[in-house]
């Protein structure tokens, strides 16, 4: 092939790179490996992760949910996973139709009018929601519930710093719920998460009215929306969430799935990609990317967000997940979470020396407050094979000696009884 | 196009989840009034078989790399080994919670550490973060680092970022989101940065330059060292968009070219199929003066193992909920082990050879505005095609031949652009076939232009009205109207 292009050597192909740069190159000292060797080596890394073999009571935004087998099989179809962003809609109707379905499902779950085709994760979706709200209201101040998950707050802090937006904390009360009646005024938006960092379901009734023209941004847990009233029913202006619960593995925290929904009136401000219905030259219904306010071919620094590629395959997983279980299955799995978490909470609260830290209603996660040191309690659960988060993350929120415990549909009664027994209860 | 919502619900249990083995609870009792949902979401209840068929049918309406050449310029649509998919699904990787004890997640932490060490060496820079989860996210992280750098140095007046007109499309938006204003640098007639224009722009308001290397014309800045030196001399820093690393990996390092910030698109250069638009990963490497600002947590190594290291007070903070797209990092690490040094060098050799081979052949048929040695991609123009045929028509006609079109109408500096990136994984037979099709289409443009104007006819749908979709948005299923409702 070199001859066909009139080149004498491979080096000639790189003659436009400065000589000094080429000679400065240092190889990695890495041999090539066969498929079999790489499989063995990667398996060794994977096997070193003891956590994958324990019983998880971890939560705080990522949960050990069951993924129906069909999801993996559909995601494993290379027509989906080896395609790219549907720039050529005529040969991307599979991806585009699934995006359209995903947007519809998110609207159904959240009670909102429009949703985009995904964001990177819940935390960056929140950051983009705050930027969007501030573009709309331009007050450069945003109120944030103190009961927001810390990993969401950390990312929001970074984006808000860069955008020059001041974040104002709103405290929470003994119920674990945000005391939004104490929220500052003259803000672009208020951010509240439900269920929140403590697993507590926030009271949203009347909040929108209290905010005046400030936007209400609600961070949600989509699987919980199988049971909970959608944020749209409380007048939310933007709903974001972490979609991992809808058919994604925990994956050590990534890839995840950001969901983002809002009102039709804010379409022009919506970050990310959106699929829309249209017709082809024969009048037949098809799908294409719509409202491309920040694609590569528009003029560029005017873009409202730099989001380009995001989490399309994760959105497909969520779509197939919801299709697989249907409305009835979604309610069923949400009820399992509710029942099992309350079963464990009730059993633990009956033990001497244990109580719940908050009395607000919860879905599948609660904060346990032992009389003795949380670390000692955690150790006993760990010795019995359970993964429980240390209390450090909650301490960042001002909650002392608390253990956050999440219970999903995967936990059997036998496992939960075992946890209770590890803390002194009867088996 | 039949959607999920056009299917009729069956009257059957989901079969996925077991019956409840603890006392069931009524939502209203547990949660109090007004908290539970009043109306179920409209999701049909279908059998597993119904759902499997629906999505299998949808998949067949798609075109992926496994179907054939996908020469989408700027996107590096190469074939990725299936092994990388399989290792990312190992239960020991997939089923680890990000807040599991560090001692119980040593495999994941160790892999992240080992991958960042390799990436650090590939970049020739001082340190790497794996937190950014996409190329554009890496750009944004880079702009945050730039901002923090000049804050810390007490130079808040450096608010301007210079951008060649041949830079990647998301660069200006990334700079703008980080609070910078953008000044465009015109390319010269060789398709590279005009040094005089650059020097005229450089002053104490410039924070840095965002260079796409090689640029979106597929051209390497021969004066890269002069460009970066000029920016450094003016007190600015150099950001390199690494989306085109495929063209020099294994033989040149951004750190040796004067880069201060460099982002990798792990999904482009180092495997991970593109998933219909993500997820990818956008690791960022930085020079020594920027190391302290990298996002937390870092992955640290101690005598006894690996840990999350939060103690970096000058850090920009976090830009992802956890540690980036770990399962994409797994694929990249597997790919690096497969390639080794020799394989990395072969990536750039074949990517550049393939692009030049196609460029040389196709420039006889389509205008090549910048006729010179290219790197991994090149840009033809559809301008001047006869009978009112446009680049869009060429793209749609390629679909009829069963080939994915190149990137079209980008970069903006070439009229009617056709941006072609064959990648290193295509063989000569495939390249020749693609070239023959492109040549056949040029003949059709002269002799049977209606074939192009009407294309595609050999696709699941005919040409779609994208303008209509933008002007009359129907963005979710119209439940009141149903399947056949045209917007």
Image (spheres, helix red, strand yellow):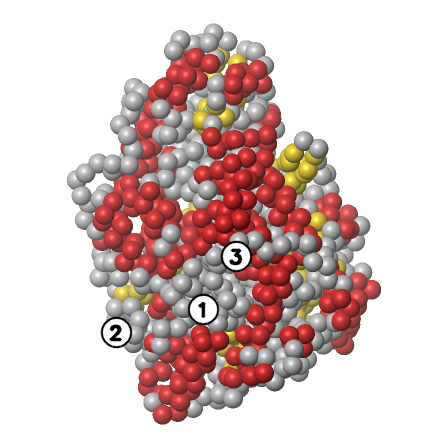
**Discs 3, 1 touching: Cβ within 8 Å:** no
Identify the residue position indicated by label 2 in the image: A282
Q: CA distance from mark 3 to mark 1?
A: 15 Å
Which chain does the residue under circle 1 lie in? B
Which residue lies most toward the right here? B233
- Precedes in sequence: disc 3 or disc 1: 1
**Discs 2, 1 touching: Cβ within 8 Å:** no
Depicted B439 relative to depicted B23: above or below: below
* Residue B292 in sight here: yes
> In the rendering, which numbered label is found on residue B271?
3
Q: Nearer the viewer, mark 2 or mark 1?
A: 1
Q: Secondary structure at mark 2?
A: loop
Which residue lies most toward the top here? A352
* Residue A196 in sight here: no
List x then y, in percent, for residue A153: 57, 38
Q: Secondary structure at mark 1?
A: loop
Which chain does the residue under circle 3 lie in? B
Are marks 2 and 1 in one subunit?
no
Identify the residue position indicated by label 1 in the image: B70
Q: Secondary structure at mark 3?
A: loop
A29 or A227: nearer the viewer: A29
């Amino acid at each position: 092939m070199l001859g066909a292009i009139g080149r004498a050597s491979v080096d000639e192909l790189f003659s436009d790179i400065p000589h000094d740069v080429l000679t400065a190159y240092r190889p990695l000292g890495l041999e090539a490996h066969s498929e079999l060797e790489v499989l063995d080596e990667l398996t060794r890394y994977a096997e070193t992760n003891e956590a994958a073999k324990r019983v998880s009571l971890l939560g705080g935004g990522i949960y050990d949910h069951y993924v129906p087998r069909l999801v993996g099989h559909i995601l494993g179809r290379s027509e989906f996973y080896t395609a790219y962003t549907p720039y050529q809609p005529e040969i991307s109707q599979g991806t585009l139709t699934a995006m359209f379905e995903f947007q519809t499902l998110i609207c159904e779950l959240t009670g909102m009018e429009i949703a985009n085709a995904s964001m990177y994760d819940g935390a960056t979706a929140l950051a983009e929601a705050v930027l969007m709200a501030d573009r709309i209201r331009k007050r450069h101040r945003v109120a944030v519930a103190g009961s927001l998950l810390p990993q969401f707050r950390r990312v929001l802090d970074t984006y808000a710093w860069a955008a020059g937006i001041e974040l104002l904390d709103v405290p929470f009360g003994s119920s674990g719920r945000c005391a939004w009646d104490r929220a500052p005024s003259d803000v672009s938006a208020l951010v509240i998460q439900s269920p929140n960092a403590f697993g507590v379901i926030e009271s949203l009734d009347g909040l929108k009215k209290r905010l005046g023209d400030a936007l209400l941004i609600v961070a949600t847990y989509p699987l919980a929306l199988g049971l909970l009233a959608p944020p749209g029913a409380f007048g939310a202006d933007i709903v974001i969430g972490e979609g991992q619960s809808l058919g994604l593995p925990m994956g050590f925290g990534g890839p995840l799935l950001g969901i983002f929904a809002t009102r039709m009136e804010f379409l022009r401000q919506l970050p990310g990609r959106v699929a829309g219905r249209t017709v082809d030259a024969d009048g037949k219904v098809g799908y294409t990317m719509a409202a491309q306010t920040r694609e590569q071919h528009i003029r560029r620094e005017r873009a409202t967000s730099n989001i380009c590629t995001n989490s399309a395959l994760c959105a497909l997983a969520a779509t197939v997940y919801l299709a697989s279980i249907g409305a009835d299955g979604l309610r069923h799995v949400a009820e399992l979470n509710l029942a099992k978490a309350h079963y464990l909470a009730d059993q633990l609260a009956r033990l001497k020396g244990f109580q719940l830290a908050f009395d607000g209603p919860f879905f599948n996660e609660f904060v346990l407050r032992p009389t003795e040191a949380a670390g000692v309690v955690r150790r006993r659960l760990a010795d019995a094979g359970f993964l429980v988060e240390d209390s450090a993350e909650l301490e960042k929120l001002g909650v002392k000696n608390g253990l956050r415990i999440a219970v999903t549909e995967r936990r059997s009664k036998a496992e939960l009884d075992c946890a209770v027994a590890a803390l002194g209860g009867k088996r | 196009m039949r959607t999920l919502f056009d299917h009729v619900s069956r009257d059957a249990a989901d079969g996925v989840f077991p019956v409840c083995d603890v006392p069931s609870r009524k939502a209203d009792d547990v949660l109090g009034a007004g908290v539970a949902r009043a109306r179920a979401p409209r999701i049909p209840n279908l059998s597993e078989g119904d759902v499997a068929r629906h999505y299998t049918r949808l998949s067949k309406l798609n075109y992926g790399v496994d179907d054939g050449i996908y020469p989408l310029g700027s996107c590096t649509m190469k074939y990725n080994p299936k092994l990388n998919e399989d290792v990312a699904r190992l239960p020991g990787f997939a089923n680890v919670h990000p807040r599991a004890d560090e001692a119980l997640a040593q495999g994941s932490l160790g892999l992240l550490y080992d991958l960042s060490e390799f990436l650090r060496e590939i970049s020739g820079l001082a340190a790497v973060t794996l937190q950014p989860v996409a190329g554009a996210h890496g750009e944004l992280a880079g702009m945050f680092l730039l901002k923090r750098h000049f804050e810390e140095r007490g130079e808040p007046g450096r608010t301007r970022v210079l951008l060649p007109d041949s830079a990647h499309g998301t660069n200006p938006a990334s700079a703008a989101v980080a609070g910078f204003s953008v000044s465009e640098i015109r390319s010269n007639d060789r398709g590279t940065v005009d040094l005089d224009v650059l020097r005229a722009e450089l002053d104490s308001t410039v924070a840095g330059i965002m260079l796409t290397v090689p640029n979106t014309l597929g051209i390497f800045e021969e004066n890269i060292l002069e460009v970066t030196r000029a920016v450094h001399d003016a007190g600015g820093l150099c950001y390199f968009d690494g989306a085109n690393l495929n063209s020099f990996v294994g033989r040149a390092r951004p750190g040796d070219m004067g880069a201060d910030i460099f982002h990798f698109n792990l999904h482009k250069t180092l495997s991970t199929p593109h998933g219909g638009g993500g997820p990818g990963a956008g690791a960022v490497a930085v020079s020594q003066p920027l190391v302290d600002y990298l996002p937390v947590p870092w992955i640290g190594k101690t005598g006894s193992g690996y840990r999350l290291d939060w103690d970096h007070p000058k850090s920009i903070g976090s830009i992802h909920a956890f540690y980036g797209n770990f399962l994409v990092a797994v694929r990249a690490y597997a790919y690096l082990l497969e390639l080794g040094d020799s394989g990395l060098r072969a990536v750039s050799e074949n990517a550049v050879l393939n692009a030049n081979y196609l460029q040389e052949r196709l420039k006889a048929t389509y205008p090549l505005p910048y006729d010179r040695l290219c790197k991994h991609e090149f840009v033809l123009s559809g301008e001047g095609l006869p009978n009112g045929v446009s680049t869009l028509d060429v793209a749609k006609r390629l679909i009829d031949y069963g080939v994915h079109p190149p990137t079209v109408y980008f970069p903006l500096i070439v009229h009617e652009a056709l941006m072609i990136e064959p990648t290193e994984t295509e063989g000569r037979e495939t390249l020749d076939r693609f070239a023959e099709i492109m040549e056949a289409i040029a003949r059709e443009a002269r002799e049977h232009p209606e074939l192009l104007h009407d294309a595609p006819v050999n696709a699941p749908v005919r040409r779609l009205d994208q303008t209509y979709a933008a002007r009359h948005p129907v963005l979710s299923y119209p439940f009141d109207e149903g399947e056949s409702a045209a917007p």
